């Protein structure tokens, strides 16, 4: 797999402190050997904590546990996954941002690393200034998924949505989630007026669609495809410019006439901004190698992810471009986290 292509959307400037920190990573990349021990002063000197802002069994938790053992083998210290669920992952993200032990990392979703502060100004950390990018781990398009009570043909679903006006509902795992923002993008592109119905999580969204309480939703491939394969829901299209290896049988929304519709979910590893550049580079290099191992790549693919394994600057760029793009949509639609 290759890292996702660069976005053409305008970028959001990092603070001077975060910019200098990120720039230092490029210098470190030239100086740090593969093992990294000589440049990191014997670090890590004790077990590392990998915080996850979602409960056991969730997609971020599964990804973290897939990475933990091989990362421990490379770094020479145990990597302990700790679940700190709440506030859409922002509780764990804040704990990572405030950690001062030099041995705490976080496995986060894109919302934690981009729009958290925009959705809720009271969020006690700023993704662009309080967290240091380490590596983009995996990316995936969302699947526009529909109730079996709707037409079978994807194009017919788009047409039915326009005709239904506000009689259709769409479900999301909460206000301000990528699924919520994506559906508002889709409504504008498709001429829909479907009404937003937030749920505690994607399992409840799936149940609501099966029962006919909501007609459509944008779901991660790992959630949508098993339901589609079981015949309980229908896959309409992917939020990608072309077909994806995650679901090659599903057309993209671009194929269905929604040109320029390009939206991905992703997860990544981040550290406190106070971490030395050499430590960050060592972990980034380890992750880049780990996610490309066939057995790890296969596990992540089964979880619904295409591996990325970028350098820190690759994640920093993704954070900037996605923040700018999502901010415009959030402000245009008056979206706020609950």
Image (tube, rainbow, N blue to C red):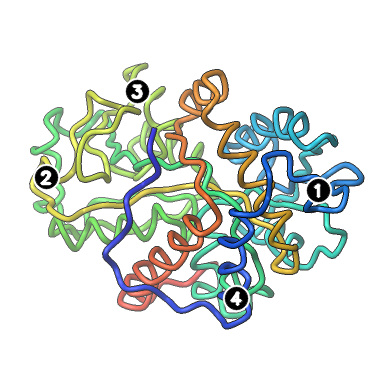
Residue 20 disc label: 4
Task: Between label 3 and label 4, give the one nearer the viewer.
Answer: 4
Q: CA distance from mark 2 to mark 3?
A: 20 Å
Q: Earlier in the sequence, mark 4 or mark 2?
A: 4
Q: Position of residue 238 (x, y in %)?
A: 26, 39
CB atoms of marks 1 and 4 within 8 Å? no
Q: Position of residue 76 (x, y in %)?
A: 83, 34
Q: CA distance from mark 3 to mark 1?
A: 55 Å
Q: Is residue 277 above or below residue 334?
A: above
Q: Position of residue 56 (x, y in %)?
A: 70, 35
Give left or right: position of 236 versus 66: left
Q: Residue furthest right?
A: 46
Pointer 3 residue? 232
Residue in front for this viewpoint, 74 or 41: 41
Q: Earlier in the sequence, mark 2 or mark 3?
A: 2
Pointer 2 residue? 160
Circle 1 crowding by C-alpha within 10 Å: few under 14, some 14–19, many from 20: few
């Amino acid at each position: 797999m290759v890292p996702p292509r660069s976005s053409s959307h305008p970028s959001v400037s990092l603070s001077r402190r975060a910019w200098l920190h990120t720039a230092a990573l490029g210098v470190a990349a030239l100086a740090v050997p593969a093992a990294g021990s000589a440049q990191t002063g014997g670090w890590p000197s004790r077990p590392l904590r990998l915080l996850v802002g979602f409960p056991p069994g969730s997609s971020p938790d599964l990804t973290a546990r897939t990475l933990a053992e091989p990362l421990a083998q490379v770094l020479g210290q145990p990597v302990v996954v700790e679940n700190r669920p709440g506030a859409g992952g922002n509780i764990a993200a804040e704990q990572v941002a405030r950690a001062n032990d030099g041995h705490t990392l976080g496995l986060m979703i894109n919302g934690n690393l981009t729009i958290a502060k925009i959705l809720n100004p009271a969020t006690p950390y700023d993704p662009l200034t309080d967290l240091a990018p380490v590596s983009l781990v995996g990316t995936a398009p969302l699947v526009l998924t529909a109730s079996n009570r709707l037409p079978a043909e994807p194009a017919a679903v788009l047409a039915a949505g326009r005709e239904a006006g506000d009689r259709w509902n769409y479900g999301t795992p909460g206000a301000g989630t990528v699924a919520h923002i994506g559906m508002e993008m889709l409504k504008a592109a498709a001429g829909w007026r479907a009404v937003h119905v937030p749920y505690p999580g994607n399992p409840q969204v799936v149940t609501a669609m099966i029962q006919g309480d909501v007609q459509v939703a944008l779901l991660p491939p790992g959630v949508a495809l098993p339901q589609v394969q079981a015949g309980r829901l229908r896959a309409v299209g992917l939020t990608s410019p072309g077909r994806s290896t995650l679901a090659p049988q599903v057309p993209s929304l671009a194929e269905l006439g929604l040109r320029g519709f390009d939206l991905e979910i992703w997860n990544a590893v981040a550290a406190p901004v106070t971490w030395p550049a050499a430590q960050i580079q060592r972990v980034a290099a380890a992750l880049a190698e780990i996610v490309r191992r066939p057995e790890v790549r296969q596990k992540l693919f089964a979880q619904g992810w295409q591996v990325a394994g970028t350098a820190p600057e690759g994640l920093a760029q993704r954070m900037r471009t996605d923040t700018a793009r999502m901010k415009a949509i959030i402000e245009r639609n008056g979206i706020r986290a609950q």
